[in-house]
């Protein structure tokens, strides 16, 4: 017997009782907003969140009733909307490289604060340089806390592609620009 509180049941009920969709909003709006804020900034997060739920509401008749969890569907919609705000995303990541509030939270040794600031800036720059697909997979995994299967569902790609993209993204983030794929410094002479 299907639980009357599962997402698919609530969405199906919302077709005849539109107010029932409010339950989906209450369950996931906070998570979608946090994900959008991290990806595109607070200014865009409100718009992305409201657009995500508007689109989901408009497409609720197309939601697959075999899926019990609406999170991958909602995060997929949000990710697609964030692509429309790619310029804003790049702007936020560039700003993170220049200003890192996480470093201010470090207490004690000023050298520790400086090291933390440099590390956040380094990671932000590396995330910004990832391909869009690799970045989407990484941020859905790290910030939205989706599983591999949920990321695959959200982005409409095979699970194997998710694993490949995450592996590549992790490798690129760990490898410094001066290092090659094997983690060693490139000592070959550069052409003049």
Image (tube, helix red, strand yellow):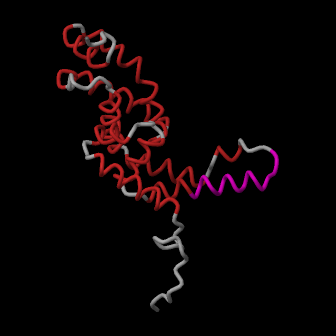
- Quick check: 159 left or right of 15? right
Q: Is residue 99 magenta?
A: no
Above or below, 72 against 102 in this view is above
Name the image quarter holding residue 25: top left
Residue 93 % position (x, y): 50, 50
Instruction: Work out which residue is located at the far front of the displayed protein and give it.
Output: 1
Query: Where 2 falls versus 35 (above or below)?
Result: above
- Quick one: quadrant of the N terminus? top left
Q: Residue furthest right?
A: 108
Position of 82 with respect to 189 (left or right) is left
Kindly tell me whether residue 59 is visible in this rendering: no
Q: Is residue 89 above or below residue 172?
A: above
Please tell me which residue is depicted at 44% across the width and 33% down the height of the picture: 45
Q: Is residue 92 in view from this perspective? A: yes
Q: Find residue 48 and report its image quarter.
A: top left
- Residue 114 included in the magenta stretch of the image: yes
| Residue at x 50%, y 59% (from the top left corner) | 173
Q: Residue at x 62, y 56 (%)?
A: 119
- Residue 38 percent location from the top left of the image: 49, 40
Q: Nearer the viewer, residue 103 or 172?
A: 172
* View extreme (bottom): residue: 192
Report the magenta residues as a range.
108-122
Where residue 143 sits: x, y (%)? 48, 39
Report the magenta stretch's main SS: helix
């Amino acid at each position: 017997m299907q639980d009357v509180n599962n997402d698919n049941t609530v969405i199906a009920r919302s077709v005849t009782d539109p107010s029932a969709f409010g339950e989906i909003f209450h369950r996931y709006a906070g998570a979608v907003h946090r994900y959008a804020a991290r990806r595109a900034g607070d200014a865009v997060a409100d718009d992305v969140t409201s657009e995500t739920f508007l689109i989901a509401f408009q497409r609720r008749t197309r939601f697959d009733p075999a899926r019990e969890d609406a999170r991958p569907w909602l995060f997929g919609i949000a990710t697609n909307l964030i692509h429309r705000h790619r310029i804003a995303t790049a702007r936020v990541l560039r700003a993170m490289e220049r200003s890192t509030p996480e470093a201010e939270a470090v207490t004690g040794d000023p050298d520790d604060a400086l090291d933390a600031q440099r590390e956040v800036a380094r990671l932000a720059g590396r995330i910004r340089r990832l391909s869009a697909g690799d970045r989407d997979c990484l941020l859905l995994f790290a910030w939205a806390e989706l599983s591999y299967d949920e990321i695959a569902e959200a982005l409409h790609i095979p699970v194997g592609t998710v694993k490949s993209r995450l592996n590549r993204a992790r490798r690129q983030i760990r490898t410094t620009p001066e290092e090659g794929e094997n983690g060693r410094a490139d000592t070959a002479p550069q052409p003049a």
